[in-house]
Amino acid sequence: MPSKDTGPSGKLTLAFFKCDSLAKESIEQHGEYQDIVHNLFEPLLPAHLDLEILTYDVLNKREYPKDDELEKIDAIIISGSFEDEAHADSIWILKLAGVGRVLLKVLGVA
């Protein structure tokens, strides 16, 4: 929901919606989800861009970006989850779907 164009920030800001936890062995070898995402994207960025990842634990803490944070987010990544089935009526999944719908409307996509 960017309100005014202030020009390039020199930063690519990704919101990472964490919907699961990795196994201890994976974390020891590769880091947490946000570390893996950072390591995937950073080498692909042009030299003039820095990568910032804002992590939101949507499964356990029900964290989502605040309105003032939405203004600086360039993209949202949602992890997969082995916690529940995608079509289950789990509260966290319903909340995520609702937030997704609102974000699509705010961003003018839906």
Image: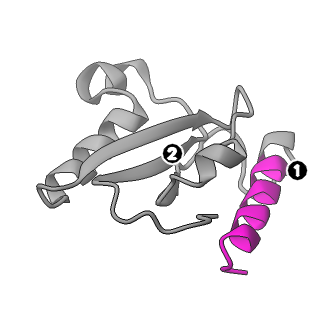
Q: Earlier in the sequence, mark 2 or mark 1?
A: 2
Which amino acid does the dot numbered 1 rest on? Asp
Instruction: Give the label on residue 89, or none.
Output: 1
Q: Is residue 32 placed above or below 44 in the rendered structure?
A: above
Q: Is residue 3 left or right of residue 62?
A: left
Residue 17 image-quadrant placement: top right
Which range is magenta? 93-110
Which amino acid does the dot numbered 2 rest on? Phe
Work out whether residue 76 or residue 94 is closer to the camera in this orientation and state it: 76
Determine whether label 2 and label 1 are within 8 Å by CB. Answer: no
| Mark 2, residue position | 16
- Residues packed near mark 1 inside 10 Å, few (<14), some (14 to 19) or many (20 plus): few
Image point (68%, 78%), residue name: 108
In reply to whether residue 96 is colored magenta, the answer given is yes
Magenta residues, dominant SS class: helix
Q: Secondary structure at mark 1?
A: loop
- Residues packed near mark 2 inside 10 Å, few (<14), some (14 to 19) or many (20 plus): many
* Render colour scheme: one colour
